[in-house]
Image (tube, coloured by chain):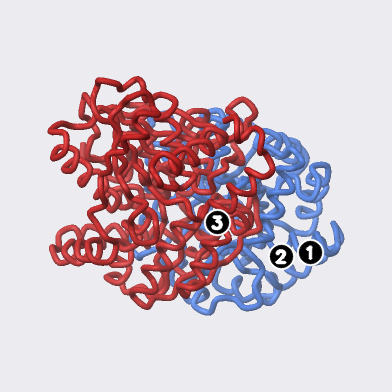
Chain colours: A blue, B red
Amino acid sequence: MASASPTISSDIDPLAACFARMRSRGGRALIPYLTAGYPEPDRTAGLLDVLAEAGADVIELGVPFSDPVADGPTIQRASQRAIERGVTLRWTLETLRSFHARCDVPVVLFSYLNPVIDYGVDRFIADAADAGAAGVLITDLPAGADRDLERRLQDAPFSFIRLAAPTTPPARLLEIAATAQGFLYYVGRMGVTGARQELRQETLAEVAALRASVAVPVAVGFGVSTPAQAAAVARVADGVIIGSALIDALDDGGNAGVDELMRDLRTAIDSV
Amino acid sequence: MTEDVTRFGNFGGRFVPETLMAALDELSEAVAAAGADPTFQAELDELLRDYVGRPTPLYRARRLGDAAGGVVVYLKREDLNHTGAHKINNTLGQILLARRMGKSRIIAETGAGQHGVATATACALFGLECVVYMGAEDVRRQALNVYRMQLLGAEVRTVESGTRTLKDATNEALRDWVATVADTHYIIGSVVGPAPYPRLVRDLQAVIGRETRDQILEREGRLPAAVIACVGGGSNAMGIFHAFVGEPDVDLIGVEAAGEGLEGGRHAASLTAGRPGVLHGALSYLLQDANGQVAAAHSVSAGLDYPGVGPEHAYLKDAGLAHYDTVSDAQALSAFRELARLEGIIPALESSHAVAYLLEHGRRWVNRGPVVICLSGRGDKDVAEVAERTSHQQGSFESA
């Protein structure tokens, strides 16, 4: 273990502070996802402000990648378009830095591994922390895939967010939860990201059981689209993550469409 | 420290979404259990003998050897396997594993269509549902194999995303698997992907090298001076190399596709011109842009048209245990026709890269001993594509 690792406590960790605040008043976190640079790079700053003003507790900012195997068509398309418009990890970090300077809503960077490796892991950790990232989530770095790399991310001055899935066996789930920082991201469906008509039925019971057995807050994403689905998830989870549905709303109604869906989600979650 | 069985040196690994981790563990356990069960190998051996037609011949190609400057050349005739390529060695092994795991549905990706055909064939044989993902560009240039898969009862899903080739077909197969992992086994067609696939596919293809070793010892009383194979993902190369890795007097040469030339970026030479990165679950050499986005590959051969490469090849390259070089589209097309005229064998465009390398560099082994080329597949699937290119580029083709 690195000896001089910065400690993360709720005093300084914005994610821990956010969820502690939520739990103390019985609230639930609304966590929107946005692909950096979609639909145009010059729209991202404004969209982040819309998300914050419409009640986001945490924002996930997606780093576009050419081969997003965990994502469905909506986020694939958004990523592809952002890449075509020149969006890079470096640009995403700069966008995060300027947002962080004007708004205190915590931001989690959501990336695939290759852009991070290419950027340089140590340089990424330093620059992401410097830009004000509250957390980092790497979709294709599951627990145990690279212990050294995982340790460096865990020792970083931001939360290293872990994913758990319906297929994760119980023993592994506890192991993941034990090292989870910030919150545990529970994959709410069998499959890739994307808006869905129906919420997967087993998810609610699984999340309720998980939340009762682990200390870290649990947020649910993948396939949560509508205010009604968000409310159902909010009954059992600490946070609700909405991605593809917001991109659909952006495509259909621009910033106003995003604002409207965010406010509906906020109302639905707060009614629980 | 115990060996990390997910790695080859620092390469390989398991960089996948969490949803797939349990399935990869399940597959690893099934592989271990099958390895300890003699009935598994016996069942596979019987299929390879009676259904595939193994062992495949090691054929002394005299006229080709003369054309290459007077070198002794043998062709390992994987093109004579049932379905026309080495791919069936892997799919039959994985079908037996899928049955042991109780999976009722099979998915696969395919580039040239040879792996798709081999998967559809194995599924037909065992009555399993089969879905094959294939890039739209490959559906166009390998139309014959699309029809073969459909005849065999498989559903071919055309992939329109990204580069519309093997890379994106693999993405879609992985996305399918994330959603269906409970009842579905994913038969990856090369020595790529997350662990345990690179080792599993290598071990199923290693029959090529085992036979070659026995055959060359019987014929020549010695090991070959060189073994040459084309490398896209690298399964036929790993299959024939494995029996010779670490032999000091055997040159192992993997031939990548230089496409239209390394300079212009229109190629598929991951090991020669890429740098380490993560794609499809493994750390290996990868074609990528300055920002870590995967770059589009190009090759006249759909089976080599892939920006990544198996992680064991990355390890062999860095360890100096194998050597990797490139051959252009034009050289491969020329070798395609050359082998047809010299030996009466029409090779796959993939395998034509290995033949082209021999024609270019064969003199190096004159008087040094026999050279073995892995003729990984037959070229029937490529005839229409080559005919079309020939009529478009008559002059350059004739002069090549």
Q: Chain of mark 2?
A: A
Residue A65 vertical placement versus B83 (above, below)? above
User: Residue at (25%, 61%) from the top-left corner?
Assistant: B48
Q: Is residue B142 left or right of residue B324?
A: right
Q: Is residue B368 left or right of residue A247?
A: left
Give the amino acid type for the residue marked by disc 2 in the picture. Answer: Ala
Asked if badge 2 and badge 3 are on a common chain, one would say no
**Residue pictured at 55% horizontal, 46% vertical:** A112
Identity, as a three-letter code, of the amino acid under mark 3: Ala
- At mark 3, the secondary structure is helix
Say which of B49 and A160 sits in front. Answer: B49
Q: Which residue is mark 2?
A: A245
Residue type pointed to by label 1: Ala
Label 3 crowding class (10 Å Cα cut-off): few <14, some 14-19, many 20+?
many
Name the image quarter holding the C terminus of chain B.
top right
**Label 1 belongs to which residue?**
A249
Identify which residue, B240 or B245, lies in the foreground.
B240
The answer to whether mark 1 and mark 2 are in CB contact below 8 A is: yes
Identify the element where label 1 is drawn. Answer: helix
Give the total number of marks visible in the rendering.
3
Which quadrant holds residue B129? bottom left
Numbered circle sitting on residue B169: 3
Q: How much space separates mark 1 and mark 2, taking CA atoms? A: 6 Å
Query: Cβ–Cβ below 8 Å for labels 3 and 1?
Result: no
Q: Position of residue B378 (x, y in %)?
A: 42, 51
Q: Residues within 10 Å of mark 1 (few under 14, many from 20)?
A: some
